[in-house]
Image (cartoon, helix red, strand yellow):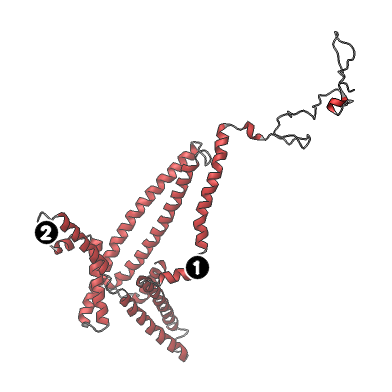
């Protein structure tokens, strides 16, 4: 027999009472604790208390976490966190792919095209010219004036001078027939104009050439003039004709560089305006109490757009510096400037090659 003792009884009860139970029915007995001053939970109960802390009860009891106390907004934030992690992993995939691209593959793809070979040869050409400029500047100083130079140094200077001239002619041959792309564009425009005016009087081809966009027309004339100057150096046409064609090519290059600088400035103003709008939107959201968790999709899109605009603005500035170097280089030929022509054109040409 087992009994449960009630430590306190009211005035209408006896001082102590007992309830007898059948031992064979339950198979175990419960002994009352000696200290009856505090409440004791029956460990055999099937409904333990709900608590966010780790239970100190038996291992068979269930522990309730903090999920039951979460609000609907907290549940939505937890649901959006895995999606944000997945999108971050997707953004990391392109950066991881970039690490697998080797420099040899980049150079191989660069040198496949004639334009890529032209830029690589330009870098070599003006690097050699820069060495020759420094060599002449050093040997003309008082410390080295009148001293006999070693034979290998004179031979090296002669070879580098010949290599610079060879690279210059090679680059001119690589850009032969560079007038074909603008001619194709002009002919395509003429075909579309002819198709649109089938019922009316057909416009002549000269009208299409005269009404072509100025950058396209300048590129076409510049390509023809460059080819004529190259053929003159190869001995196919006369020297006087080649010099005149070279002068015309310089004027076209000067004008097209100015046009490209204007287009570059307009494009950068548009990029800066868009960047200012995105920055203002991000600032307004931050001052309004919006966070990445409260509006993750819009905030992430704005951040990505801001990074893209800043990268685009950086490359626009690089292109502008390259155009400025080209403008300095061709200005010496257009205006026939003589003061420090070799040094200035060498520095401008090397800087243009590096920026390109």
Quadrant showing the N terminus: top right
Q: CA distance from mark 1 to mark 2?
A: 54 Å
Determine whether 17 is above or below 148 in the image.
above
Mark 1 and mark 2 residues within 8 Å of each other at the beta carbon: no
Assess disc 1: are there few (<14), some (14-19) or many (≥20) residues with their C-alpha within 10 Å of its C-alpha.
Answer: few
Q: Which residue is mark 1?
A: 102
Could you tell me which residue is drawn at 20 percent across and 63 percent down?
A: 187
Is residue 149 at least partly visible in the picture?
Answer: no
Residue 200 screen position, x and y as percent: 10, 54
Q: Nearer the viewer, residue 293 or 263?
A: 293
Q: Nearer the viewer, residue 348 or 198?
A: 198
Q: Which residue is mark 2?
A: 202
Q: Nearer the viewer, residue 48 or 307?
A: 48
Secondary element at tag 2: loop
Q: Quadrant of residue 243?
A: bottom left
Secondary element at tag 1: loop
Residue 20 screen position, x and y as percent: 87, 19
Earlier residue among tags 1 and 2: 1
Could you tell me which residue is drawn at 38 percent across and 48 percent down?
A: 274
Is residue 285 at least partly visible in the picture?
Answer: yes
41 on left or right of 138: right
221 on left or right of 128: left
Q: Quadrant of residue 165?
A: bottom left
Quadrant showing the C terminus: bottom left
Could you tell me which residue is drawn at 27 percent across and 78 percent down?
A: 230
Assess disc 2: are there few (<14), some (14-19) or many (≥20) residues with their C-alpha within 10 Å of its C-alpha.
Answer: few
């Amino acid at each position: 027999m087992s009994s449960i003792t009630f430590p306190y009884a009211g005035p209408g009860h006896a001082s102590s009472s007992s309830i007898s139970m059948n031992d064979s029915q339950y198979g175990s007995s419960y002994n009352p604790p000696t200290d009856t001053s505090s409440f004791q939970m029956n460990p055999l109960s099937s409904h333990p208390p709900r608590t966010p802390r780790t239970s100190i009860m038996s291992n068979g009891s269930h522990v309730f976490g903090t999920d039951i106390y979460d609000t609907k907004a907290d549940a939505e934030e937890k649901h959006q966190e895995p999606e944000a992690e997945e999108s971050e992993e997707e953004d990391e995939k392109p950066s991881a792919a970039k690490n697998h691209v080797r420099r040899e593959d980049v150079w191989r793809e660069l040198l496949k095209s004639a334009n890529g070979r032209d830029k690589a040869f330009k870098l070599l050409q003006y690097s050699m010219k820069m060495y020759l400029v420094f060599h002449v500047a050093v040997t003309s100083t008082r410390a080295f004036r009148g001293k006999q130079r070693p034979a290998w140094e004179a031979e090296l200077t002669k070879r580098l001078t010949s290599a610079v001239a060879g690279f210059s002619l090679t680059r001119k041959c690589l850009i032969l027939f560079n007038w074909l792309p603008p001619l194709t564009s002009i002919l395509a425009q003429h075909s579309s104009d002819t198709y649109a005016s089938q019922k009316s009087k057909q416009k002549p081809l000269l009208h299409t050439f005269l009404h072509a966009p100025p950058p396209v027309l300048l590129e076409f004339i510049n390509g023809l003039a460059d080819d004529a100057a190259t053929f003159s150096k190869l001995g196919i046409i006369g020297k006087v004709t080649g010099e005149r064609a070279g002068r015309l090519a310089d004027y076209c290059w000067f004008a097209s560089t100015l046009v490209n600088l204007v287009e570059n400035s307009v494009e950068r103003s548009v990029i800066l305006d868009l960047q200012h709008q995105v920055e203002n939107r991000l600032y307004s959201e931050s001052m309004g109490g919006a966070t990445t968790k409260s509006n993750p999709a819009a905030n992430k899109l704005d951040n990505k757009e801001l990074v893209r605009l800043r990268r685009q603005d950086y490359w626009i500035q690089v292109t502008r510096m390259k155009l400025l170097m080209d403008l300095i280089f061709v200005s010496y030929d257009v205006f026939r400037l003589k003061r420090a022509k070799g040094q200035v054109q060498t520095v401008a040409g090397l800087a243009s090659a590096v920026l390109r």
